[in-house]
Image (tube, rainbow, N blue to C red):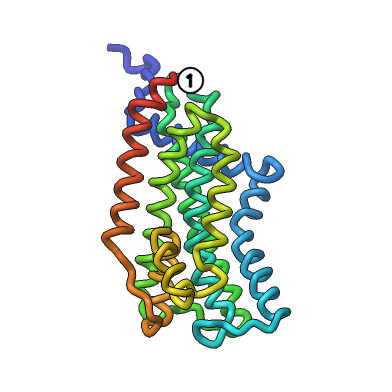
Amino acid sequence: MNAHAPSLPQRQSHLDVYLRVLSALMLRDMRSRFGGNYWGYLVQVLWPCVHLGILVGAMTFRGIKSPMGDDPMVFIASGALPALAFQYISREVMKGYMIHKPLTYFPQVKRFDTIVARVLVEIVSSFLGVCLVCIVLLCFGVDPVPADMITAIGGYLTAIALGIGVGTVNVGICSVFPGWVIGYILVTVTLYLTSGVYFMACYMPDEIYYYMKWNPITQIIEWVRLGYDPTIPVQVDYLYLFGWVFGSLTIGLLMERYVVRAQQ
């Protein structure tokens, strides 16, 4: 055997190819936001801080006191962050599938890969947004650390998990009805306005509060706020929320297997 013969290139493993595809999709996701560059991705990460500032400014202007604790920033953040995490992930997973759909004509890119890539990007974005909000609160002299860290983190992770589950269901729906991308915006806006971000749902009349508890986002917000104030009069139905998380994820994966792939 000739020692000077050129060596053959090593064949990449399936895992290496898969990771390269995921990284390429994630980078494309980050550049496909506002403006078509990475600065657009930064705008999305900063949006929770802007959102928090607008809501707190509106409460201060109208002279509304915080119904939980003494600081309106903590009250708004404890409700807006989990609600926005669910809203962004469940919506952006669907949008990512629609944006990257032409790439699935390449044999290396599967439609499920576009879902995984967008989920990873949105999870990172959510935690970056939380970190930035905490930094802003510290700059204003507000302590963002909850009294019960495990409870608050558990509620926020549940919001992310529910967003992933509902996002996969949305992918199955929009693969058949592309107009659902627009229709779901109305759904998320309605859920956001009625879930208790700006008010304490438990202080509503019992007849109204009973129906609000059917909204999983309402209970997730109450779960997070329990981490900040364990004395608020709420009872979270954890079994109900886990049923939503695992049920939506199961339905979404089944739809990806039998509906989305059938469109190929």
Q: Judge whether 14 appears above or below 60 on screen.
A: above
In the displayed structure, would residue 75 be above or below residue 194?
below
**Residue 174, horizontal then vertical, whole percent:** 50, 32
Q: Residue at x 27, y 12 (%)?
A: 1
Expressed as whole percent of the image width and height from the top left, the position of residue 119 reads: 45, 45
Q: Is residue 232 above or below residue 241?
A: below
| Residue 216 coordinates in the image, percent (x, y) | 40, 58
Is residue 242 among what the camera can see? Answer: yes
* Quadrant showing the C terminus: top left
Query: Crowding near pointer 1: few (<14 within 10 Å), some, many (20+)?
Result: few
Q: Residue at x 49, y 57 (%)?
A: 85
The outermost residue toward the top is 1
The picture places residue 251, in percent across and down from the top left corner, at: 33, 39
Left or right: 43 in relation to 243: right
Q: Is residue 54 left or right of residue 121?
A: right
- Residue 99 makes an appearance in the image: no
Per the image, the residue denoted by label 1 is: 106
Q: Secondary structure at mark 1?
A: loop
Q: Residue at x 48, y 47 (%)?
A: 90
User: Which amino acid, by three-letter code, is at mark 1?
Assistant: Phe
